[in-house]
Amino acid sequence: MTITPKTAEDIEGMRLAGRLASEVLDYLTPFVKPGVTTREIDKLAHDYMVDVQQGVPATLGYQPPGYPAYPASLCTSLNDVVCHGIPDDRPLKDGDIVNIDVTVIKNGWHGDNSRMFLVGNTSIAARRLCAVTFEAMWKGILKVKPGARLGDIGHAIQMYAEHNGFSVVREFCGHGVGAKFHEEPQVLHYGRPGTLETLVPGMTFTIEPMINAGRRDIKEDRKGNRPYDGWTIVTRDRSLSAQWEHTLLVTETGFEILTLSAGSPPPPPFALDAGYVCPVHTTA
Ligand code: MF3
Ligand code: CO
Ligand code: CO
C-alpha cells in the first residue's frame, strides 16, 4: 500500500480543515428539530462552509467511479438509512434519529466527520443505539498509536458493538483522508487484532462505524418504482442504523482527533479512564 505520512505543514492544514468540519456540525445543531427539512439543513451547511468558512463542501458534485455526482453539501441518513442519505423535502419528525456527515475542503485539505442527532423525544432503543455507536467509535480511536494495526481498531469496534447486541456494517469503512477525500488505507470496523496495516506517525484517516440495531445486511434504497438515487443505503431488515465519524492523526505517542470543536460531545468515561485528556472538555 502507498500511504504517505503527512508532513508538519500538511498536518497544520488538516487541523484547520478538521476543526471547520466539526464547527459546521456545531452550527447546524440548533436547527436539527422537528419540522426542519434535511434540504434546509443542507442549504444552511452549504452557505456556512462557502460564505463563513471560505471552504468547499467536498460532497457536492463528488463522483467516485460507478456513482452519479452527489447532489448535496452533506449526507443526512435518517433512521434505517445506513449512510449517504441525500437531503430532501421531508420534515424531520419527533422520534427520528439522523446522522449528519460533513466534509469540508480548506486550502486543499479535507476534514470529514459526522454525528447522530436525536430529534425531539426518541425511544430508549434509538438512544441506546446512538450511544453504543459513539462508544464503539471511541473504542476504535483508543487503539490508535504508532505500531498498532488497523485490525486492532476494527476488532475493538466489532467486539463492543456485538457485545451490546448490535451488528457492524461491512460494506463501508473508514478511509485515509488528506488532499484526497478517500485514499488508502481502508479502515474496517470489524476484524482481528494484529492484522492489516501498521500505524505510523503522520497518518490521517477516519473511523466511522455504521452500527445496526438488527442484522448487518444492507441494500440500496429502491423506493417503489422510482429510479434508485444511486447513493442511499438502508438496512435490509429496516432496523435503525447509527454512525459517528472523526478524522484522526497518528501522533508519536497515540492519536489526535482533528475534527474537534467547542460543540463536540464529551468523550465517554472509559476514554478518560484510559488517560485521554480532551482539549475541549478540560475542567481546569
Ligand atoms: N462523508 C462520507 C464519508 O465519511 C462520504 C460521503 S460521499 C457522498 O466517507 F458523496 F455521499 F457524499
Ligand atoms: Co469518511
Ligand atoms: Co464523512
Image: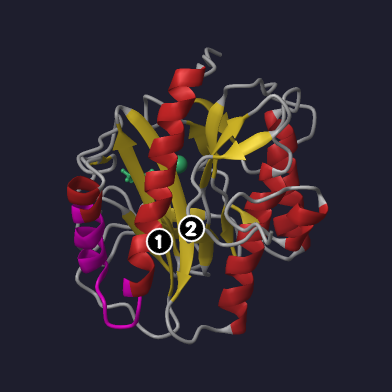
In this rendering, position of residue 24 left or right of residue 284: left
Q: What residue type is labelled 1?
A: Asp
Q: Residue 262 carries which label?
A: 2
Residue 222 vs 256, above or below: the answer is below
Q: Residues within 10 Å of mark 1 (few under 14, many from 20)?
A: some
Q: What's the residue at 45%, 53% (across, down)?
A: 114
Residue situated in front as seen by the camera: 226 or 39 = 39
Q: Residue 225 carries which label?
A: none
Q: Which amino acid does label 2 sit on?
A: Ala
In this rendering, position of residue 67 left or right of residue 191: left
Residue 35 highlighted magenta (yes or no): yes
Q: Are marks 2 and 1 in contact (CB under 8 Å)?
A: yes
Could you give the CA–CA distance between mark 2 and mark 1, rounded to whole angstroms? 8 Å
At mark 1, the secondary structure is helix
Residue situated in front as seen by the camera: 179 or 284 = 284
Q: Residue 26 carries which label?
A: 1
In this rendering, position of residue 195 left or right of residue 1: right
